[in-house]
Image: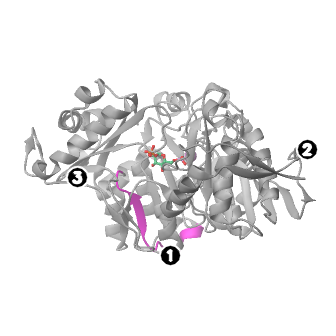
Amino acid sequence: MILSVDARPYTDQTLGTSGLRKPVPHIMQPHYVELFMQSVFDVVDVAGATLVLGGDGRFFNDRAIQTILKMAVANRVSHVVVGRGGLLSTPAASALIRARKAKAGIILSASHNPGGPDGDFGIKINAAHGGPIPVSVSDAIHQRSRTCDRYQILAGDDFSLAEEGRRHVEGCLVEVVDSVRDYVGLMETLFDFDRIGDLFRSGFTMRFDAMNAVTGPYATELFHRRLGLPEASLMNQVPKPDFGGLHPDPNPHHAAALVDMVAGRSEVDFGAASDGDGDRNLIVGRGLVVSPSDSLAVIAANARLVPGYRQGLAGVARSMPTSRALDRVAASLGIPAHVTPTGWKYFANLLEAGLITICGEESAGTGSDHVREKDGLWAVMMWLAILAERRLSVADILADHWRTYGRDYYQRLDFEEVDAGAAEELMDSLRRRLPTLAGTRAGAFEVVEAGDFAYTDPVDGSVATKQGVQIISGDARIIYRLSGTGTRGATLRVYLERFEPSAERHHLPTSEALAAVRDTAMAMAEVTRFTGRTTASVVS
Ligand code: VG1
Ligand code: CO
């Protein structure tokens, strides 16, 4: 039986950089998920459509997925493809949307944010191309949610998601699929598994940290069962609703155990980790953590060594705050390098139009045209494939890269949970001073260009403004922007970058190489005066 339920609309269902994201107690308010999903179903017009549904297994994943399934049936969706146990990584969901020609995908995740009853929950909506919906659609969903006061839902028992299978309910086919199989099949089309297996057989050692999140089952199948990595080389590979208390953000701060083992004590050759929903990656070598911006540049420079990319790259793209290391590779390959605002939706358009093959962000998201999302395990596979071909250490691959292109020292400072009003004031104050900043000097830093990043999408013509304040001084660059994924107060991100052409100066600790840029960045925006902070909460 289909019920029609009346409820009072919520007015705060805005979609940020990556969908709806809220603290768990907030999202568990009566009818909150239901009204949001009804708005999605109304805007996307799902009657008769195929949908893909799954999540990263965090607290409330199991409840939300039942609600959404029952609402999908009530809204006359004709086919729902759902991951077994309610699990799907973000890149696996993207692949399934494309393979099944679904109209949309619903991914239950707050990505790299902590989980558990006091953590965060999120709902990401993807389009038929497999990537995040464009801003025009997320705006329409938010608009609809402001007045949506009734939703349709199937009354009855929960669906069993424990085993693969198909069930028809009220004209809707609910199909539970293996969450991993299709994804690993896709990896097989891109990589030479035997060559990577040879690398492991040669004595090369690795640790992969799934951070108790969704990539555990994927990593077990891919690295252990298919490529022969010993199971003991996998860490935290069983998904847990609270991520075992870990914060599943693969950066040196939150993946400290892995970083200490590989980069600190040099106990293994290669370490990698991914985030809550499996779209980010961290790459670590003996004695060093690879900066995500460098990782992107190395992957692009070496892509032709990998079977899936033998024919070369159509173009590449990075988000504006990502370091310019990628641009140097593109210039040397003679291919276009696009610069987009933060968030994968912009890349999705470029990928869809065939303008780029590989793209990435400084926040440890890297991906290619095999899906329309960033893909953590794909990035790890790219590194393994490159290491298998070149048989150099991670440190030597980087040193060689920097010798060829120069080194872009890079660091991101996150000031988390600062007062939202104060953060806005800081940005407003900077924006007001932009016209007068060019030509000013702060120590060695002479401002050549100062602006607020705006982007016109070459594919759909949409315009995004106020995407981050960028201050450029020849070889150095400072960027300020506010996070669109935080759920408590505001998070100010300050990005620091300096190009160093000379190989003799490629071995400085990053914080030392960027000390002067950091001091300038703190002073120019008066970070301490506005936020009360002298140091960042997280440095990555
Ligand atoms: C952050 C990152 C951004 C990334 C986004 C979604 O956004 O900086 O690069 O695309 O998270 O990642 P923000 O607005 O907080 O800086 V995830 O792994 O949600 O899917
Ligand atoms: Co993520």
Residue at left offset 30%, top offset 24%:
533
| Left or right relative to 522: residue 224 | right
- Residues at marks 2 and 1, CA–CA distance in whole angstroms: 43 Å
Q: Which mark is residue 157?
A: 2
Q: Disc 3 to disc 2, how far (Cα)?
A: 64 Å
Badge 3 element: loop
Q: Which residue is mark 1?
A: 353
- Quadrant position of residue 316: bottom left
In this rendering, is residue 267 above or below 89? above
- Displayed quadrant of residue 370: bottom right
At which x and y percent is residue 273?
57, 40
Q: Are marks 2 and 1 in contact (CB under 8 Å)?
A: no
Between circles 3 and 1, the one closer to the viewer is: 1
Which dot, 2 or 1, sits closer to the camera? 2
Mark 2 Cα shell of 10 Å, populated few (<14), some (14-19), many (≥20): few
Which residue corresponds to mark 3?
501
Left or right: residue 219 versus residue 529 is: right
- Comparing 345 with 67, the one in front is 67
Kind of residue indicated by mark 1: Ala
Quadrant, the C terminus: top left
| Element on which disc 2 rests | loop
Tell me the magenta residue range. Answer: 307-321
Of the two numbered discs 3 and 1 on the same chain, state the one appearing first in sequence: 1
Q: Nearer the viewer, residue 343 or 496?
A: 343
Expressed as whole percent of the image width and height from the top left, the position of residue 471 reads 21, 49
Element type where label 1 sits in the image: loop
- The reply, left or right, for residue 289 in relation to residue 309 is left
